[in-house]
Image: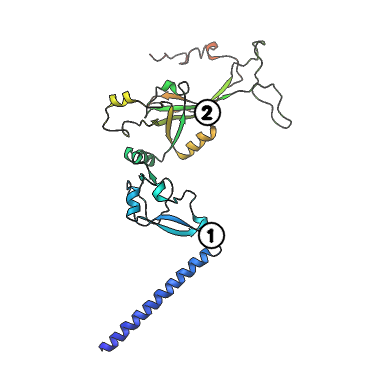
Amino acid sequence: MNSRRAIILIVAIVLGGLATLGLLSYVGGVEDAINDGQQTAEIWVVTQPIPKGTSAERVIAENFIGVQVVPVSLRPSTAITDPQTELAGLVAITDLPPNAALVAGNFVSPTVVATGITDRLEEKGMVTVTFSVDQTRGAAYLMEPGDFVNVLRRYELSEVEEGTGDEGEAAPDIVITEQGTDRDGVLPFDFDTRYVYQKAEILAIDKSLPADLGDATATPEEAAAAGPANAGLITLAMPPEAAQYLLSIGIDNLYLSLVPPSYQPDALEPLDLGETVLPGEDELRLTPYGPDSEPVE
């Protein structure tokens, strides 16, 4: 009986070995079929879970990542090629799962993670847009991180004559006559200013952050005394599509207008640049506050 069991066990082991060899042969054949005729490339991938905040030095030393060969077509354009150099001094921006390709942006400065900026952005589904404004376009630098602003874009009007559109094109709607002609028909506008977005949140000014994201050890007085090194470097938080829209319009002539937290955005129609009567010449618009309102004291 014991001999029969031994024979059965040996046969099972042999069959298991043959099955393993068959499986390895099959997998190798599949890989060959996938890569047949394709160029391959090496990429770095996560081999075991990397917790948020883990230093790149530890990731490399403890083999949290490894090299994997993939078809060139599957290699991310932002793939990390030299972790020792490219990730030096950085930490994981979020939890990284196994088999994830290692790409630029997976690791950032420890300061970024410590401030909680990425958590704030992730929570609201936001990204950042950063641009520079001078004091005139940046509300005299009276803004602080956490404030809200309306974003306006100013366009310079070209001096054109009526009916000068190319053949097949509509003639220009805006007519600007030369200075010194009769008042009738003279338009008072040199620029067209439009609202791009309303009530956008200022995430940072230079590297200064809102109180809930900044240095908790600094008092408000200390933070105010330090101030931003570049008060005109503004970072707004907004959804990805909004950021794309803003940058497509262009940031060279953006103007920021401070609004209170209670401000309720309301759609505004573009100005009628064909009118010749200014608000101060209209009894219903004599002041910016309307006929029945008082200015802010």
The percent position of residue 230, horizontal first and vertical second, equals 41, 27
Whichever of labels 2 and 1 marks the residue nearer the N terminus, that label is 1
Which residue is under mark 1? 39
Query: What kind of element bears circle 2?
Result: loop
Q: Are marks 2 and 1 in contact (CB under 8 Å)?
A: no
Q: How far, Cα to Cα, is label 2 from label 1?
A: 44 Å
Q: Quadrant of residue 202?
A: top left
Mark 2, other Cα within 10 Å: few <14 / some 14–19 / many ≥20: few
Numbered disc in front, either 2 or 1: 1
Q: In percent of the image, x 53 and y 14: which residue is there?
A: 279
Q: Please, what is the three-letter code of the amino acid marked with disc 2?
A: Asp
- Between 129 and 194, the one lying in front of the other is 129
The percent position of residue 115, horizontal first and vertical second, equals 33, 37
- Between 82 and 117, the one lying in front of the other is 82
Q: Assign the N terminus to one quadrant of the image.
A: bottom left
Which residue is under mark 2? 252
Color theme of the render:
rainbow
